[in-house]
């Protein structure tokens, strides 16, 4: 039961081509034994088609099969061979008629090929054009000539090269027309990575696009670049330090111009050098020490004099004695912390009131403010004097009129409290 429910890992297929030089497709042999070179009739989305067997019955992993896998209907008979020959003649005449109509209508398009369905129900024309083309009138003319269904399909220049075929600059048939199933994306960056000429005539194929073979070795070049220094890198060699002037990725070698002898250029393997700076120097890169030479300097870097003169600093360690306890240590630490916070607290000066101004002549300023308060004003002393005693009036000073009040003295700074002047005359009457 387990073997029956298990999905098979391999599937039996045959290789079929619709046209010589075109893409190969897998088909289910459906119990028919096919050999290379046989002509078969196969089932497709467009109906029965005539094909060529390029590979007999063989097994491939199921993961490589594109579902659904269509079957082989039968091997081609003599009647099938006759119909295929008639269709090829019809295709040739249709291509000539279509090219003539395109020239008459002056349409900006180039006809590539014409294909006829095996049952003769449809004619398919492939063409290339730089822009969109209005070919409705062309379809009407072709339909009136062949009395069948007409379909025009625009393709790219690469598809044209694959369908037409030819020889590349290497002297071999086009890769796309011989073994490539799909077109892989190719960019100019691949030519730069492989250090090829950027001339369009040397890196372009017959189709006018970049050659498909640029993709073949791209992965290998990327792996070699990871293990090689960049151009203009500063390296250390057995003969001294220098700058990389040329790379040989395939041989894993570099050419180095010596720092002390610029006229000398040496070739070294990547394993015999040490990269001190990878790539061209930037403004933000730190300078390379003059004594940094891992290979030419004996594998060790000489220590700087200032490093040797720098004394070694160790952090202080506090030892705990047997008679000390953790509680005592915590109390000491808290007291030290409180003292540190108290000493670190800033003193705020009150400049307006002079709160922290030091006292002069050994007197305390707050006491000076309280001293005048002990003395009572003149009016209070008069009120508290005995009733039987009469206080004499202050005699008028010379130059002052009798009954006039004493003019106040002009002083910019007035004292906060005015002291009572002693009486100048006889004492109080008894």
Image (cartoon, helix red, strand yellow):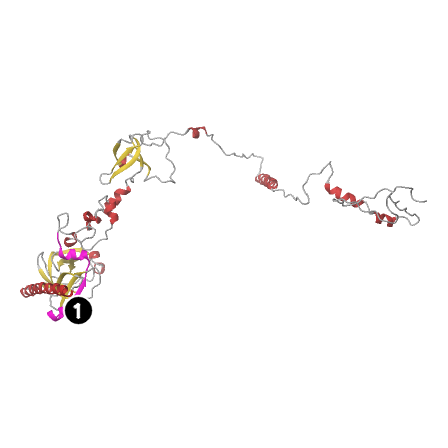
Residue at position x 26%, y 32% in the image = 265
Q: Quadrant of residue 258?
A: top left
Residue 327 or residue 73, whichever sits in front: 73
Is any part of residue 26 visible from this angle? yes
Q: Is residue 60 left or right of residue 320?
A: left
Magenta residue check for 147: yes
Q: Which residues are magenta?
A: 141-166
Q: Position of residue 376 (x, y in %)?
A: 82, 46
Q: Residues within 10 Å of mark 1 (few under 14, many from 20)?
A: few
Q: Position of residue 5 (x, y in %)?
A: 22, 60
Residue 209 or residue 267, whichever sits in front: 209
Q: Quadrant of the C terminus?
A: top right
Residue 242 or residue 43, whichever sits in front: 242
Q: Position of residue 217 (x, y in %)?
A: 21, 46
Q: Answer above or below: position of 26 versus 253.
A: below
Q: Quadrant of the N terminus?
A: bottom left
Is any part of residue 49 visible from this angle? no
Magenta residue check for 234: no
**Total tally of numbered discs in the picture:** 1
Residue at position x 28%, y 36% in the image = 244
Q: Which residue is mark 1?
A: 137
Task: Looking at this view, name the residue that lies furthest to the left.
Answer: 78
Q: Is residue 129 left or right of residue 94?
A: right
| SS label for mark 1 | helix
Q: Position of residue 387 (x, y in %)?
A: 91, 50
């Amino acid at each position: 039961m387990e073997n029956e429910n298990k999905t098979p890992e391999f599937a039996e297929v045959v290789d079929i081509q619709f046209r010589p030089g075109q893409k190969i497709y897998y088909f289910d042999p459906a119990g028919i034994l096919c050999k290379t070179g046989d002509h078969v009739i196969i089932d497709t989305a467009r109906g029965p088609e005539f094909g060529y067997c390029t590979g007999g019955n063989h097994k491939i992993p199921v993961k490589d099969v594109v579902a659904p896998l269509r079957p082989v209907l039968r091997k081609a008979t003599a009647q099938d061979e006759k119909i295929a020959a008639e269709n090829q003649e019809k295709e040739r005449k249709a291509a000539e008629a279509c090219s003539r109509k395109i020239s008459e209508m002056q349409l900006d398009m180039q006809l590539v090929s014409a294909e006829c369905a095996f049952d003769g129900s449809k004619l398919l024309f492939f063409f290339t054009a730089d822009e969109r083309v209005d070919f409705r009138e062309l379809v009407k003319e072709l339909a009136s000539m062949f009395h069948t269904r007409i379909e025009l399909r625009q393709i790219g220049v690469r598809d044209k090269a694959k369908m037409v075929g030819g020889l590349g600059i290497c002297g071999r048939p086009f890769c796309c027309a011989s073994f490539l199933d799909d077109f892989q994306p190719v960019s100019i960056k691949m030519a730069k990575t492989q250090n090829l000429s950027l001339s369009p005539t040397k890196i372009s194929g017959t189709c006018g696009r970049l050659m498909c073979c640029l993709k073949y070795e791209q992965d290998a070049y990327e792996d070699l670049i990871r293990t090689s220094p960049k151009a203009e890198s500063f390296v250390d060699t057995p003969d001294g330090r220098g700058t990389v002037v040329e790379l040989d990725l395939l041989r894993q070698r570099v050419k180095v111009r010596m720092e002390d002898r610029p006229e000398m250029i040496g070739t070294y393997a990547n394993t015999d050098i040490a990269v001190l700076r990878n790539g061209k120097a930037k403004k933000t890169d730190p300078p390379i020490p003059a004594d940094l030479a891992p290979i030419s300097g004996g594998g060790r870097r000489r220590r700087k004099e200032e490093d040797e003169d720098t004394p070694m600093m160790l952090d202080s360690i506090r030892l705990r004695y047997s008679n000390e306890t953790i509680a005592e240590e915590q109390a000491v630490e808290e007291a030290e912390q409180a003292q540190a916070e108290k000493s670190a607290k800033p003193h705020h000066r009150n400049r307006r009131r002079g709160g922290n101004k030091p006292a002069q002549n050994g007197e305390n300023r707050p006491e000076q403010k309280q001293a005048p308060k002990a003395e009572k004003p003149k009016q209070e002393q008069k009120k508290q004097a005995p009733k039987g005693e009469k206080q004499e009036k202050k005699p008028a000073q010379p130059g002052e009129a009798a009954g006039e009040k004493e003019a106040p003295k002009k002083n910019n700074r007035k004292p906060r409290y005015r002291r009572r002047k002693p009486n100048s005359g006889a004492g109080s009457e008894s």
